[in-house]
Image (cartoon, rainbow, N blue to C red):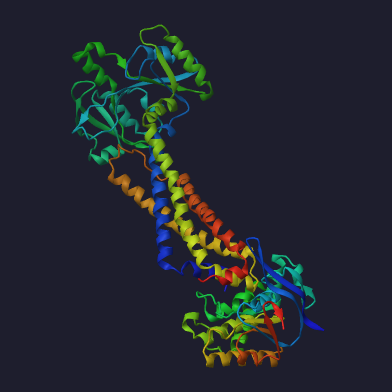
Amino acid sequence: MSLVSVQNISKSYWRDSQEIRVLTNISFDIAEGDFLGLMGPSGSGKTTLLNLIAGIDKPTKGSITVSSTDISKLNESELAKWRARHIGFVFQFYNLMPVLTAFENVELPLLLSKLSKKERREHVEFALQIVGLGDRVHHYPKQLSGGQEQRVAIARAIVTDPTVLVADEPTGDLDKVSAEEILKLLERLNTEFKKTIIMVTHDPRAAERAHKIRHLDKGELS
Amino acid sequence: MHILKLIFKNMLRHKLRSFLTVLGIAIAVMAFGLMRTVISSWNSGVEASAANRLVTVHAVSFIYPLPLSYQDQIAKVPGVRKVSFANWFQGIYKDKDQFFARFAVDPDNFFDLYPEVVVSPKEKEAMKNQRNGCIIGAKIARTYNLKIGDLMNIDGDIYPGQWQMQVVGIYHGRDETSDETWMLFNWHYLDEGLKQASPGRAGQVGWYIVDIGDPNQRAAISAAIDNLFTNSPAETKTQTEKEFNQSFVSMSGAILTAIDVVSFVIIGIILMILMNTMVMTARERIREYAVLKTLGFSSSHLVSLIGGESLLISSIGGALGVAITFPITSGIHKVVPPQWFPVFNLETMTVVLAAASALLAGVLAAAFPATRAVQTKIVDGLRQIG
């Protein structure tokens, strides 16, 4: 049984009275523990598709089921709670809170849980150890390199043990060495910790790490 | 970490901006407090009016005197307990700038009608027995370094001539709202002087102060007093002491209204200062709010973050403003001659209003940026370049 099921998804935007179709009749499934790479040229709709799966945008048509929940039927409030529980998001530009330390940034999603302070600390320390930043807990984002910032962002994404880890161009802002480290980390999360990962990238070397690759072109899967 | 810590850290993100905003609010709150204090000081005489005191003046104008003979007639009106009288003496002490209220008063019972003027029986008796005896307020004594036994030479203007009074007592106010800047002297000294210098003006008083037992009977008693003197050469107008004092304050009505309006304009300024900061802050953080939403934070969390920061800034600014208003009010009271503002106290209600205004501004200033942050779609927020 698939963990993520995308059925006949279409997404359009309206500019004045003109409809701009971004995605057209997309259907595919992702099994639990999979590592899917979404590739395609700029403007092909891959980030839009990722956003729909992550529940931060809504399809114009079709349905998306994640772990038996049809998220296209959830309202904003329900979606927020669902994301907190099921989605770990890794952004291209890390998007860490500059006023918070690495520890506090990773702890942020746990503030929405009922965990005690002690439990939160244990979870955060564990997540930071996994990404290899156990010695940088009190550093602020500006005191870290790009690669380290992205590793903190990954720790933030996995600290709640989400159902799906989605990554939007996670190596897009990194040098080769750092990008390689991040890709190794994602690979480890998939193989060692059995995390289901969906990664958008236009970098063929990054896509090589995925078990499956789907190509998008002009809003359609090829 | 708690959400409050994030609010606090966000506030300190732009330290200079936050500091200037807090300072701006503090100064505005202080200005608001000072203006309200000026207004309440101006109205202090009205507020301190006793409900059981009526004032009877000449029906044509306060400046015309009334015959002394009215005292006994008024005393016989049912409901009247005691009747005293006073004259506005004015005069010049040292020079024209040294202004404070000088009254010639009935030494027999004036103090019985003014329990807020606290003076010892011995001093009252001294004024009664000494023709040129006077009792001065404690603030006047401090200002001019006067003590019992000192002489005060006054050049008469309304009542021409040289008048020499001797301080026989110093009174204190019953509480901080009581005026301690009066000079009260024996009316008989004035009357005897007039008998010699201008006999036609002798035997007259400026106004009567009437003590009534039941304030609810004031309308009936006022009418009864005025009816006594209908069609006489000196018809009377009797009113409550509050109305009497109000008639003086209303002469400055336009200025007071202007100060009143400006004091509330200041609340608008507080709001604008804070709103400017919060709108800038929220606009810069639209992307961060989108990230928080992605992590699962709800609209109410964002409202708490933005509202909390706004309230934190306004609370600090408001608290600082109120804190500096106390010493500044006190400093002004010390520097300004006491007769300008006999009572100049920062009232509890003013403090409450100032603090509440700052907090209200905190809430209102957060409304627009919070609404915007909540309504911005995550995908649009993530596209923002912060």
Residue A161 visible to the viewer: no
Q: Position of residue A109 (x, y in %)?
A: 63, 75
Residue ID at (34%, 48%) = B330
Q: Position of residue B165 (x, y in %)?
A: 22, 28
Q: Residue furthest top?
A: B231
B313 vs B128, left or right, is: right
Q: Residue furthest front?
A: A18
Q: Residue furthest right?
A: A1
A102 vs A59, left or right, is: left
Task: Give residue B170's quadrant in the image.
Answer: top left
Question: Please, is residue A46 above or below residue B76 in the view?
Answer: below
Pick the front one: A201 or B25: A201
Instruction: Check the picture and name the quadrant holding the C terminus of chain A.
Output: bottom right
Question: Please, is residue A122 above or below residue B285 in the view?
Answer: below
Task: Give residue B59's quadrant in the image.
Answer: top left
Q: Position of residue B21 (x, y in %)?
A: 42, 59
B189 vs B266, left or right, is: left
Q: Position of residue B379 (x, y in %)?
A: 62, 70
Residue B41 visible to the viewer: yes
Pick the front one: A115 or A204: A204
Pick the front one: B198 or B367: B367
Instruction: Check the picture and name the quadrant holding the N terminus of chain A.
Output: bottom right
- Count of marks placed on residues: 0
